[in-house]
Image (cartoon, rainbow, N blue to C red):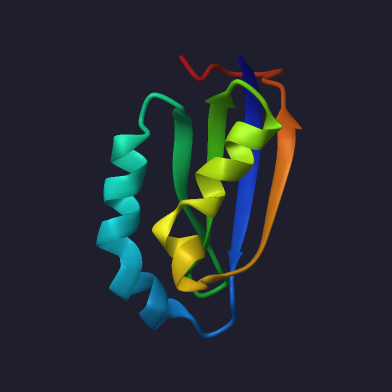
Amino acid sequence: MALFMLACFDKPGAIQLRMATREAHLAYVRENADAVKLAGPMLDAADQMAGSLFVLECADREAAEAFTTNDPYQKAGLFDRVEVRGFKVSIGSLG
């Protein structure tokens, strides 16, 4: 298993779409809680939700990409872009 960071950036002005899809997104994340090591919304300068950040533990990059592909936020067209990168903990703990 490997760690991956997913940075999902919302389209500008999409807070209403985010809020309308939020419960489905949270249910999806709970269903996949075994892979989710850390998650939460990214905030803009006005402290409004403007994206999502995940640290996932997955078998490979394809599994991490599948996670975001199946996220209700992604299916609803909320994200402007998604970056998937390998991740290595150097300080702190995800335990």
- Looking at the picture, tell me which residue is in the foreground, 35 or 45: 35
Residue 13 drawn at (x, y percent) = 52, 85
Taking the image as shown, residue 30 lies to the left or right of residue 11, namely left
Name the residue at 44% across, 48% down.
40
Vertical side of 55 occupied by 44: above or below: below
Residue 82 drawn at (x, y percent) = 66, 57
Residue 70 drawn at (x, y percent) = 47, 51
Name the residue at 36% across, 43% down.
29
Quadrant assignment, res 4: top right
Quadrant assignment for the C terminus: top left
Vertical side of 67 occupied by 18: above or below: below
Taking the image as shown, residue 26 lies to the left or right of residue 47, namely left
Residue 36 drawn at (x, y percent) = 45, 31
Vertical side of 6 occupied by 44: above or below: below
Name the residue at 33% across, 68% down.
21
Name the residue at 33% across, 47% down.
28
- Looking at the picture, tell me which residue is in the foreground, 83 or 70: 70
- Looking at the picture, tell me which residue is in the foreground, 63 or 14: 63
Q: How many marks?
A: 0
- Looking at the picture, tell me which residue is in the foreground, 82 or 53: 82
Residue extending furthest bottom?
Answer: 13
Quadrant assignment for the N terminus: top right
